[in-house]
């Protein structure tokens, strides 16, 4: 069914869908790959389960809070700039999160963890908000189908 619907899209629309699908997939990998490794590393640094649980939980809270703000300012910022800036920020923060094992001490480790996750969530929120806006603009006749196709 998705293939039938894709045949009605222009080359630009198909390319947009492919790029957004790859970006969405890579974003999910960056955000999800931290979960199996971080708790063990946090415990080595003296963090409790509550502390590193909050480090993960703050991500969704920040996305929840910042998405409407980005949406409100989307026309002023520009969807492409917001999309690219969000992907760049999320990627850089994912890399920085990987270097947290080099931080000595419990408090600096947890503090940097929170700072990096908050900034990463802001980038993720920017990317998601912009991608929804761009897809709605590029696919005005097939918004629902496009959102489903992007996430398959």
Image: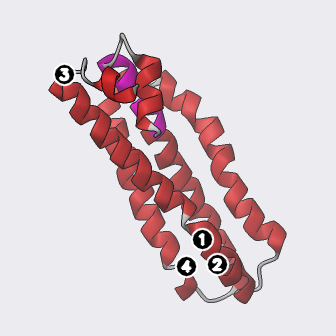
Magenta stretch, residue numbers: 128-138
Residue at 39 percent of width and 15 percent of height:
142
* The label number, if any, that marks residue 10 in the structure image: 3
Decide whether the magenta segment is chiefly helix, strand or loop. Answer: helix
| Pointer 2 residue | 109
Is residue 148 depicted above or below 119 in this figure? above
Kindly indicate whether the residue at mark 1 contacts the one at mark 3 (C-beta within 8 angstroms): no
Does 120 lie within the magenta span?
no
Q: How is the image coloured?
A: secondary structure
Q: Earlier in the sequence, mark 4 or mark 3?
A: 3
Q: Are marks 2 and 3 in contact (CB under 8 Å)?
A: no
Residue pointed to by mark 4: 100
What SS does tag 2 mark?
helix
Q: Label for residue 112?
A: 1
> At which x and y percent is residue 24?
42, 46
The mark nearer the N terminus, 2 or 3, is: 3
Q: Secondary structure at mark 4?
A: helix
Does the magenta portion include 133?
yes
Helix, strand or loop at label 3? It is loop
Instruction: Find the distance from the CA under tag 4 to the CA under tag 1.
Output: 8 Å
Label 2 crowd (10 A; few <14 / some 14-19 / many >=20):
some
């Amino acid at each position: 069914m998705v293939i039938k619907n894709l045949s009605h899209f222009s080359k630009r629309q198909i390319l947009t869908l492919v790029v957004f699908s790859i970006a969405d997939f890579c974003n999910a990998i960056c955000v999800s790959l931290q979960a199996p490794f971080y708790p063990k590393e946090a415990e080595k640094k003296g963090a409790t389960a509550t502390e590193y649980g909050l480090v993960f939980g703050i991500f969704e809270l920040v996305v929840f809070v910042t998405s409407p703000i980005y949406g409100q300012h989307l026309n002023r910022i520009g969807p492409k700039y917001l999309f690219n800036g969000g992907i760049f920020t999320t990627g850089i923060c994912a890399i920085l999160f990987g270097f947290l094992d080099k931080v000595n001490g419990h408090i600096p480790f947890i503090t940097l963890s929170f700072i990096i996750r908050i900034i990463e969530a802001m980038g993720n929120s920017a990317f998601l908000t912009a991608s929804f806006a761009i897809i709605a603009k590029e696919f005005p006749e097939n918004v629902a189908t496009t959102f489903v196709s992007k996430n398959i």
